[in-house]
């Protein structure tokens, strides 16, 4: 089981990552978001920042669908994310090891090529 502190620790361990001031967490590399807390919007209610759910950049629609269909206990989406290469991850359902892989993959897809070599094992 992972939490927002794990997200923060793992994201900030990656090269050239900055955390944007927010009510939850929001991490970027070269001004491109790769993982942030889910801003849940329910009809007729104010937006709620969910730090128990991470929004992850996944690169493309095929990867998004593979995650959603393959692991519905971990991943979901919302109508506001239709057409975007993003999935929501239930942090309470994911291991820290798997979270590290997912955050690193999201970073790799958003980081410019010249930063790729700065990552250990990259």
Image: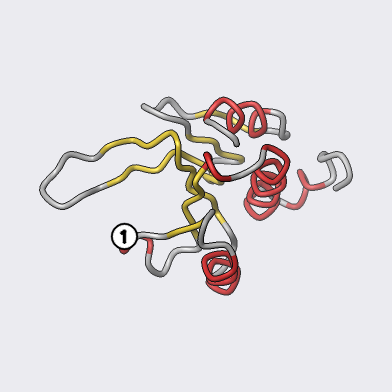
- How many badges with numbers are in the image? 1
Residue linked to disc 1: 80
Residue drawn at the location 64% of the way across and 34% of the way down: 11
Which colour scheme appears in the figure? secondary structure
Residue drawn at the location 47% of the way across and 31% of the way down: 25
For the N terminus, the quadrant is top right
The image quadrant of residue 63 is: bottom right
Instruction: Give coordinates of residue 103: x percent, y percent.
Output: 64, 44
Residue drawn at the location 35% of the way across and 60% of the way down: 78
Q: Nearer the viewer, residue 1 or 99?
A: 1
Position of 40 relative to 12 (above/below) = below
The image quadrant of residue 97 is: top right
For this view, does 92 lie left or right of residue 23?
right
Residue drawn at the location 86% of the way across and 39% of the way down: 120
Instruction: Give coordinates of residue 35: x percent, y percent.
Output: 54, 43
Instruction: Give coordinates of residue 45: x percent, y percent.
Output: 14, 43
For this view, does 83 lie left or right of residue 17?
left
Crowding around mark 1 (Cα neighbors within 10 Å: few <14, some 14 to 19, many 20+) is few
Q: Nearer the viewer, residue 115 or 21?
A: 21
For this view, does 21 lie left or right of residue 112?
left
Position of 57 relative to 120 (above/below) = below
In this view, which residue lies farthest toward the bottom? Answer: 62
Q: Could you tell me which secondary element the residue under label 1 belongs to?
A: helix
Position of 85 relative to 105 (above/below) = below
The image quadrant of residue 76 is: bottom left
Instruction: Give coordinates of residue 41: x percent, y percent.
Output: 25, 48
């Amino acid at each position: 089981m992972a939490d927002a502190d794990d997200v923060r620790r793992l994201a900030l361990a990656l090269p050239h990552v900055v955390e944007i001031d927010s009510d939850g967490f929001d991490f970027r590399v070269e001004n491109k978001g790769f993982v942030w807390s889910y801003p849940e919007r329910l009809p007729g209610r104010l937006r709620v920042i969910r730090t128990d759910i991470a929004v992850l950049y996944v690169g493309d629609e095929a990867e998004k669908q593979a995650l959603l269909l393959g692991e519905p206990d971990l991943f979901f989406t919302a109508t506001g994310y239709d057409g975007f290469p993003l999935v929501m991850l239930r942090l309470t359902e994911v291991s820290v090891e798997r979270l590290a892989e997912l955050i690193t993959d999201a970073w790799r897809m958003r980081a410019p090529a010249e930063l790729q070599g700065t990552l250990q094992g990259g």
